[in-house]
Image (spheres, coloured by chain):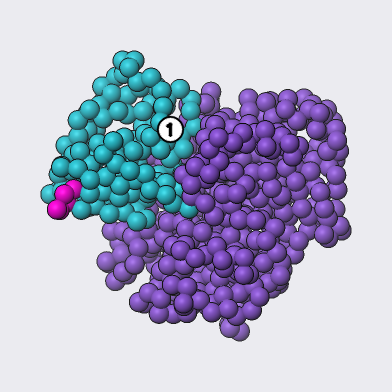
Amino acid sequence: MNSFLRRIDQWRLLLETGVVPGMAVPGLIYADDYIESLLKGEDALSQVANVACLPGIVGYSMAMPDIHQGYGFPIGGVAAFDVSSGVISPGGVGYDISCGVRLLASKIPAEEFRPRADRVLAALFSAVPCGVGSVKDSLGTKEVDRILEEGAVRVVRSGRGTEGDIRRTEEGGCLVGAEPGAVSPRAKERGKGQLGTLGSGNHFIEVQETEELFLPETAASMGLSKGCVAVMIHCGSRGLGHQVCDDYLKVMGRAMSKYGIAVPDRQLCCAPVDSPEGRQYLGAMKAAANFAAANRQTIAEAVRDVFAGFFPGEKLATVYDVSHNLASIENHVWEGRKRQLCVHRKGATRAFNGLPVLIPGSMGTASYVLEGTPGAERETFGSACHGAGRVLGRNEAIRRTSGRNIPKELSAKGISVMAEKAGTLGEEAPEAYKDVSAVVEVVHGAGLARKVARLRPLAVMKG
Amino acid sequence: MAWKILDHTADAGFEAEADTLAEIFLDAAEAFLFIAAGPAPGDFSETGEFHTFFLSAVDGEELAVSWINELIFIAETRSEWFLPLQVRVSLSPPSLSARGKTVALKGRALSVKAATYGGLQLRTSPRPFLRMYFDL
């Protein structure tokens, strides 16, 4: 596989056609030497090649520098399909539809937070449920439908949030064209008890300090102040989104023969964008994305309530809220021609010119705020990376951290940590991930996004 | 334990080989419980309610995925583990009936979110074999 990789420049690798039969376009992987060294033996490259076989793909099957093995698509994958001749694939969005990041900024000095870190963390743990059966008041079916249709707007209109939250959420926190009717009763049942829950695995709430400003004016316009506290929330559409993905994998698996589509990996099953199955999935996916936006809005409000108890009068304003698992119908110019495309970003963030790009690091390492550029719009359909990207499997991470006291190690760095499950800390140890600064350097160097600010963790709540 | 855990960069999987398809599906449920809840998921000696369900699918692979996803659905919507006591599996047509008891999940975060088709393999000969990865 690696013999098909050819370095284009310091930041880019080309995966030539021919790796697997039927590649319609080459692969383009954003990677420096460090990222390339981590690709050895990774199934992710096969997944980049498999995506290149899908009908109607435009340009390249791309992967961002946080690339690692996913299902069907690699994590970090970006692929655009012509709306008239291409496909939409639930596997190109992922199970956790519209998993994403919300960043809140405050003027609270980090030194005022530090002495309270453990108590704030414990309060966050009480205020934001992680798991199943932990929500006291589950939603009725009608309310689930309203949330699927209106997203974060529904939460704000019920008094939980501000208009500023909506303005600073991707697509205003409500994807137009969401179809609650395309979401199965089974998915809605899963969502009823999960609004405002964090989930498990790599989902987290992290209190951070804005440590360094690379573009001070831009950072100021986003509300970020050096030395002050910010809060990052990472979660998605929970079981509801997973059920939508599972439901439509079945729908599309059955429909492919009707459209004469064959895929090299069952997880890549798909249907034409402009088909009943494609339109139905798009409507259901948008509805699930609205649920995810509402979920992050609900959690943001719970975080604000907690902070109000410790820092009365201080505000936590939304910097931005952006998804990194989504397919979106967008207009782009490709090879000099205006095209309407269905852009799949699976573990990749929309990076339109001037919009914030939020890049969470691994537990105990920095996170970044970037800004999208015209370069991304020209080259990657307006996309950048979404995080550090795993480098160790969960079992391997647990094996390597066995016997270590990770909370103590993080505490020595001035980071408080609490997790729902003790095992999560081993799975999510910093060495399980790539160096986030190196990942960000690649997208910055390649001109896909500019560095605005770096944030360091002060307190981490893991699901 | 008739199954073994498989590594995945972001997630986890298992593979199992057994004498019958029914045993493979029981192994899958056990591996799911292990990965979702850890080696000591709780005290299941308490009396649970008996529960029966039926599934059908277009093929054996979809049936295997649906089986685990049904266990996840029960866990998420009822806050209960389904502990299968008996499973009957047929591939012509692909269908399954399961009888077991449910016990309280007690508010734990469920670390397995879905069974996937990625890397999925179900063989019936020479011996029944299943490989499956979970989205965590």
* SS assignment for the magenta stretch, majority: loop
Asked whether A386 falls inside the magenta stretch, the response is no
Residue A3 vs residue B24: left or right? Answer: right
Q: Is residue B126 magenta?
A: yes
Label 1: few (<14), some (14–19) or many (≥20) C-alpha neighbours in 10 Å? some
A38 relative position to A372: left or right: left
Residues drawn in magenta? B124-128
User: Is residue A325 in view from this perspective?
Assistant: yes
- Quadrant position of residue A443: bottom right
Chain A in the picture: what colour? Answer: purple
In the figure, the cyan chain has which letter? B
Q: Is residue A52 left or right of residue B54?
A: right
Q: Which residue is found at the position 47% from the left and 58% from the top?
A: A69
Image location of residue B47, percent across then percent down = 31, 15
Tag 1 residue: B38
Q: Find residue A9 and report its horizontal and vertical position in percent.
A: 64, 79
Q: Disc 1 residue type?
A: Gly
Question: SS at mark 1?
Answer: loop
Question: Which residue is found at the position 71% from the left and 49% from the top?
Answer: A366
User: Can residue A156 be seen by looking at this rendering?
Assistant: no
Q: Residue A153 location in percent, x, y? A: 63, 43
Image: A333 above or below A202? below
Which residue is rendered at x = 23% and y = 42% of the image? B24
* Quadrant in which the N terminus of chain A is drawn: bottom left
